[in-house]
Structure formats: structure tokens, C-alpha cells
């Protein structure tokens, strides 16, 4: 996929030290194109996991509100508090584009590995850290490292959290690089598939077929 964003939305507030990549906006657009009609149903609940300043979830809803409707709720779960003020600014900016559609957004400052009673969602989207500990070169900045590496929780906990947080028939889409794709693919009875790529990242897909409650 080209690195040119053919469906721009708005200029996001974000920390000067670490900017999101086009992978996030391409993921949001792909999910919209695949599920826009489902997202238009009343009461849809979405989670942007490892949300940062909210780009994936907000870009998804921007496309949805420009072309369809949305009468649901989006939670943004993020562990680094530095992002919260940027998320709030982005919510304010986006609300200005759609003044007649109150945005039911919630910022949740929490580690997904420590969630004991997860809410249930129809869709989970995530651009999580791309690198495992021991891969790549770390930065002197702890903030950057926490964005790029699985430091606060591991990928296994992420998959368990997604599975526990999806409604029956719910779906999760998240980005991984080749190394983690290969590791997940080797797991026995893996429920994750990799239907397509955006730029240099694979889009991983998980669908919950039955309730585990």
C-alpha cells in the first residue's frame, strides 16, 4: 500500500517527541471500508487499544460520520498519561467538524494487562508497540520506548485481553510487524489471521465466534 494518505481527516494534536505513522490512519480507513454498515447500527461499542492521542478511533469515526451514521460509543485505552491532553484536544477539534453529532468518547488511563472485568466491544482496533524486548535499538527516552516496545505488558496479555473484551461475533484488528506475525502464526490453535498489509505492517484479525462467559 502506498504511504500517501488518500483520505485525510484533520491535523492531530500529539506529543512533539513521538508522532503516529500512516499505519494508524490506513488501519482506520480499512476497517471503515469493511464495516461501515455495521458501524451504523445503534449501540455499537468500539475500543481503540493502546490509543495514544486517539488517532485510530477518531479517524475511523471521522470517515463514518462523513458518509454514514454512528450512534455508539468509543473507549480509548492508553497507559501513558502524557497523551490525555492531546486526546482531549483532538476530541474537541473533531467535535467541531460534526457539531450535530455529540461524540461519546471516553479516555481510560489503564494497563490492559491489569483490567480484571473488561467491557465488551463489537470492534477493537489497535496500533500497539511494534517491537518485542530485545528487538531494535532503544531510545534514551522512556516515553519513546514505551510507545515502540512491549514494555508495560506483553503481546500474549494483549491477545487475551482482546478475546475477553469482544462480544460474541466481535472483531479485533491490530497491526504487527513480520517478527510478531511469525511468532503468533506458530502458536497452536491460533485464532489470529493476517488478511492484508498496510505499508510495512500486517493487519492481524481476530473474531470471537462464541461467548466464553
Image (spheres, grey):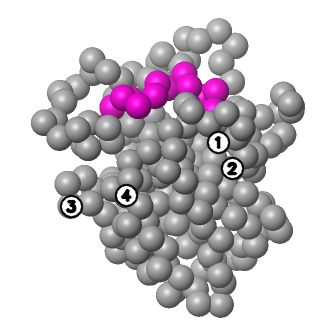
2 or 4: mark nearer the eye = 4
Task: Measure the alpha-carbon separation of dots 4 and 3.
Answer: 11 Å
The image's mark for residue 172 is 1
**Which residues make up the magenta segment?**
148-161
Residue at 20%, 54% in the rendered image: 17
Q: CA distance from mark 2 to mark 1?
A: 6 Å
Where does the C terminus fall, quadrant-wise?
Answer: top right
Task: Give the residue number, with chain letter if any, for mark 3.
Answer: 16
Looking at the image, which is closer to me, 183 or 195?
183
The question of residue 104 being in magenta is answered with: no
Rounded to the nearest whole Å, what is the CA distance between mark 3 and mark 2? 29 Å
Classify 10 Å Cα crowding around label 3: few (below 14), some (14-19), many (20 and above): few
- What label does residue 123 carry, if any? 2
Number of the front mark, 4 or 3: 4
Q: Earlier in the sequence, mark 4 or mark 1?
A: 4
Q: Mark number for residue 83?
A: 4
Amino acid at each position: 500500500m502506498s504511504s500517501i494518505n488518500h483520505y485525510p481527516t484533520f491535523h492531530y494534536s500529539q506529543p512533539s517527541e513521538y508522532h503516529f505513522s500512516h499505519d494508524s490512519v490506513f488501519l482506520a480507513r480499512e476497517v471503515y471500508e469493511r464495516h461501515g454498515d455495521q458501524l451504523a447500527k445503534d449501540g455499537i461499542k468500539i475500543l481503540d487499544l493502546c490509543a495514544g492521542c486517539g488517532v485510530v478511533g477518531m479517524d475511523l469515526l471521522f470517515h463514518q460520520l462523513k458518509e454514514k451514521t454512528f450512534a455508539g460509543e468509543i473507549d480509548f485505552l492508553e497507559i501513558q498519561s502524557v497523551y490525555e491532553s492531546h486526546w482531549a484536544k483532538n476530541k474537541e477539534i473533531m467535535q467541531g467538524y460534526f457539531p450535530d453529532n455529540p461524540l461519546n468518547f471516553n479516555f481510560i488511563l489503564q494497563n490492559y494487562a491489569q483490567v480484571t472485568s473488561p467491557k465488551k466491544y463489537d470492534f477493537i482496533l489497535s496500533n500497539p508497540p511494534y517491537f518485542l524486548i530485545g528487538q531494535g535499538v532503544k531510545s534514551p527516552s522512556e516515553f519513546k520506548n514505551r510507545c515502540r516496545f512491549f514494555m508495560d505488558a506483553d503481546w500474549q496479555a494483549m491477545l487475551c485481553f482482546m478475546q475477553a473484551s469482544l462480544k460474541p461475533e466481535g472483531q479485533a484488528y491490530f497491526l504487527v510487524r513480520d517478527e510478531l506475525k511469525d511468532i503468533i502464526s506458530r502458536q497452536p490453535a491460533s485464532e489470529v489471521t493476517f488478511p492484508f498489509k498496510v505499508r510495512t505492517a500486517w493487519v492481524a484479525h481476530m473474531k470471537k465466534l462464541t461467548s466464553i462467559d
